[in-house]
Image (cartoon, rainbow, N blue to C red):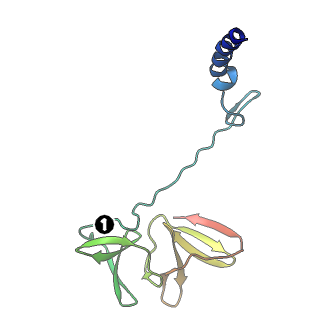
Amino acid sequence: MKFFSRYSMLLIIPSIFFSPLSLSEPHGHGEKHGNKRNDKVVVIVKEPKHKVGYKRKHMPKGSTRIVVKKSNYYFYDGFYYRSIRGQYQVVASPYGARIQRLPVGYKKIVIGVTPYFMFEGTYYVYKESTRDYMVVEKPHSNNQVIIVSEH
């Protein structure tokens, strides 16, 4: 019996590693070729340009000083900064901050009947009375979300 077990293992192990199943794609993956299904899924995850906590020594020309609830912020290239220990650090977008122009790369979305403008996780609404864009909380709704355009 030991003799049979040793030789059967010698036959089984190589057949597992070199079987046609082990060399082929897992079921349902890859491109279609004849009868062979070969679907491939590519997921692209876009990392934000700057994460909260990113620091720089100086604010570049073109940055804008914004006051929100008596606190100074600096806005540049779609991100909000605060002066912390002699450096400028990216912080969460302050609700109520207002900007004249949206950053390049924003998306316009409509939830229900309300248009929102989104950039790197920050949501804005356009205020007709002041002709600017105000940072708001992420909208929560059971209504259908429609991405209208990307800019």
Q: What kind of element bears circle 1?
A: strand
Number of marks in the rendered image: 1
In the image, is 79 to the left or to the right of 23?
Answer: left
User: Residue 16's quadrant in the figure?
Assistant: top right
Which quarter of the rendering shows the N terminus?
A: top right
Report the amino acid beneath label 1. Answer: Lys
User: Residue 5's quadrant in the figure?
Assistant: top right
Instruction: Residue 40 in the image: state x and y as whole percent.
Output: 64, 39
Task: Give whichever of 79, 20 is nearer the camera.
Answer: 20
Instruction: Residue 133 in the image: state x and y as whole percent.
Output: 49, 80
Q: Tell which residue pokes out farthest to the front in this image.
A: 1
Task: Give whichever of 80, 132 is nearer the camera.
Answer: 80
Residue drawn at (59%, 44%) of the image: 42
Task: Give whichever of 51, 80 is nearer the camera.
Answer: 51
In the image, is 111 to the left or to the right of 69?
Answer: right
Instruction: Residue 150 in the image: state x and y as whole percent.
Output: 55, 63
Callout 1: 10 Å neighbours few (<14), some, many (20+)? some
Task: Give whichever of 85, 117 is nearer the camera.
Answer: 85
Does 87 sit above or below residue 6? below
Check disc 1 and report the residue beneath it.
55
Residue drawn at (54%, 50%) of the image: 44
Instruction: Residue 78 in the image: state x and y as whole percent.
Output: 41, 70
Residue drawn at (77%, 27%) of the image: 35
